[in-house]
Image: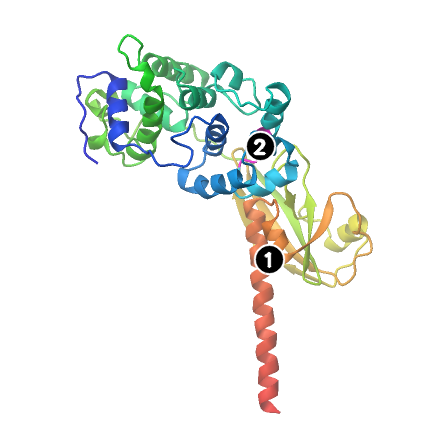
């Protein structure tokens, strides 16, 4: 990708020219003023790459083509379509915001930043992006990629997560916007998309392509050979460690799942029943479910890192023939293998379910082989 912009043009003009020639233009949420679809894409793209979002966006829009259909859907169905995308609080906010739009805005999705920031899950940067794309409103954005571009170009030291550094970055973002006197404000959508595209494809975290960047000529980090040092990394700290035992209870080809509380990690999703590490499995089954295990198998440990802690999962596979206490228990249900994997479950739980299914298929193949061998010997 060749750089073909004039270095003596304003920062914004160079970004706009580059975006028009080299930026992304064919994404399914582009080339539209539909604030609803733009909003969906912006929420999905928070802390998630475009390639990951694309199939989720297509399925989500097919299931909920309008804000009214999203608002009318039960949260469980929304979580089911979000399952695997991560950061599930976004889905909760998405559903809540859709209901606010229907109840307070007559089902018309707002396109101005001031109103957008009143909706659940929409902050200053997201509101500005939606307003730029849907209504051509001039406003600064500051997502993770843009923070990196500005920190390098303006030589802003310090970890961007601190309030003081964020304030500096916001001031820079505001100062570099296309200005009305220059007649550039009408290109705010191209400028906003260009900042996102350069952060994602050019000014990358590792091995940035400075030779292809339209604003590298006056980039302070490049001038001072500090590209690798900016933005400053998060201060190193050890993540708190947590551990939990997960009970993978099976009965006649079905798996027992329990719905998690609406708030907290994996809020509202289906997962395996849990118990503290070290507790007696038989005692827990008896006390919690009035059930008895026919067989117990400890599976390899699994680890999953959240933003604020690391979780070690101790999965225990339990087979039961009878289940006297689980029927009708609130928040607990039996799922078939296929329906469990398709349900609103977190990605680590889906992987465990896949492991169970694979193990069951292998066991069936071994039984078939033994039957064939016995037949051959007859």
Query: In this rendering, does residue 275 appear at all?
Result: no
Please say if 130 is above or below 302.
above
Badge 2 density bin: few <14, some 14–19, many ≥20, Cα 10 Å: some
Quadrant position of the C terminus in the picture:
bottom right
246 falls in the magenta region: no
- N-terminal label among 1 and 2: 2
Q: How many marks?
A: 2
Residue 259 falls in image quadrant: top right
Query: In this rendering, does residue 98 appear at all?
Result: yes
Which label sits on residue 54? none
Instruction: Report the magenta stretch's main SS.
Output: helix
Q: Are marks 1 and 2 in contact (CB under 8 Å)?
A: no
Residue segment shown in magenta:
87-94
- Residue in view at x 72 percent, y 49 percent: 333
User: Which x, y percent locates residue 207?
Assistant: 27, 36
| Residue at mark 2 | 89
Badge 1 density bin: few <14, some 14–19, many ≥20, Cα 10 Å: some
- Residue in view at x 67 percent, y 62 percent: 253
In three-dimensional space, the C-alpha distance between marks 1 and 2, rounded to whole angstroms, equals: 29 Å
Quadrant position of the N terminus in the picture:
top left
User: Which x, y percent locates residue 68?
Assistant: 60, 30
User: Which x, y percent locates residue 40?
Assistant: 50, 31
Q: Which residue occupies the foreground of this view, 301 or 102?
A: 102
Please say if 66 is above or below 63.
above
| Residue at mark 1 | 299
| Lateral position of residue 188 relative to residue 314, left or right | left
Local SS, label 1: loop
Mark 1 or 2, which is nearer the eye?
A: 2
User: Which x, y percent locates residue 210?
Assistant: 23, 31
Q: Which residue occupies the foreground of this view, 335 or 351?
A: 335
Local SS, label 2: helix
Residue 18 falls in image quadrant: top left
């Amino acid at each position: 990708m060749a750089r073909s912009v004039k270095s003596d043009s304003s920062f914004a003009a160079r970004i706009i020219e580059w975006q028009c020639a080299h930026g992304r233009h064919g994404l399914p949420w582009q080339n539209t003023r539909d604030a609803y679809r733009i909003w969906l894409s912006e929420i999905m793209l928070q802390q998630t790459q475009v390639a990951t979002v694309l199939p989720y966006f297509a399925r989500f829009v097919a299931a909920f083509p309008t804000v009214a259909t999203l608002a009318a859907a039960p949260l469980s169905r929304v979580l089911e379509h979000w399952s695997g995308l991560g950061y599930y609080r976004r889905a909760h906010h998405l559903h809540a915001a859709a209901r606010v739009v229907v109840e307070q805005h007559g089902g018309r999705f707002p396109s101005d930043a001031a109103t957008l920031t009143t909706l659940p899950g929409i902050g200053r940067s997201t509101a500005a992006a939606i307003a730029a794309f849907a209504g051509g409103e001039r406003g600064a954005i500051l997502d993770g990629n843009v923070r990196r571009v500005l920190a390098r170009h303006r030589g802003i030291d310090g970890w961007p997560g601190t309030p003081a550094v964020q304030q500096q970055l916001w001031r820079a973002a505001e100062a570099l916007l296309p200005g009305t006197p220059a007649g550039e404000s009408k290109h705010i959508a191209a400028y906003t998309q260009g900042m996102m595209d350069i952060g994602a494809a050019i000014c990358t975290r590792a091995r940035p392509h400075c030779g292809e960047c339209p604003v590298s000529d006056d980039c302070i980090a490049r001038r001072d050979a500090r590209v690798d040092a900016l933005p400053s990394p998060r201060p190193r700290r050890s993540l708190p460690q947590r551990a939990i035992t997960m009970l993978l209870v099976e009965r006649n080809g079905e798996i027992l799942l329990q719905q998690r509380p609406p708030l907290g990690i994996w809020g509202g999703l289906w997962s395996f029943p849990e118990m503290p590490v070290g507790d007696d499995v038989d005692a827990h089954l008896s006390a919690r479910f009035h059930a008895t295990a026919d067989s117990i198998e400890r599976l390899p440990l699994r680890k999953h890192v959240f933003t604020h802690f690391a979780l070690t999962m101790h999965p225990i596979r339990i087979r039961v023939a009878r289940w006297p206490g689980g029927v009708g228990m609130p928040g607990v249900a039996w799922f078939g293998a296929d329906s469990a994997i398709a349900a609103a479950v977190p990605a680590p739980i889906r992987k465990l379910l896949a492991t169970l299914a694979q193990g069951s298929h292998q066991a069936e193949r071994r039984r078939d082989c033994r039957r064939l061998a016995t037949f051959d010997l007859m």
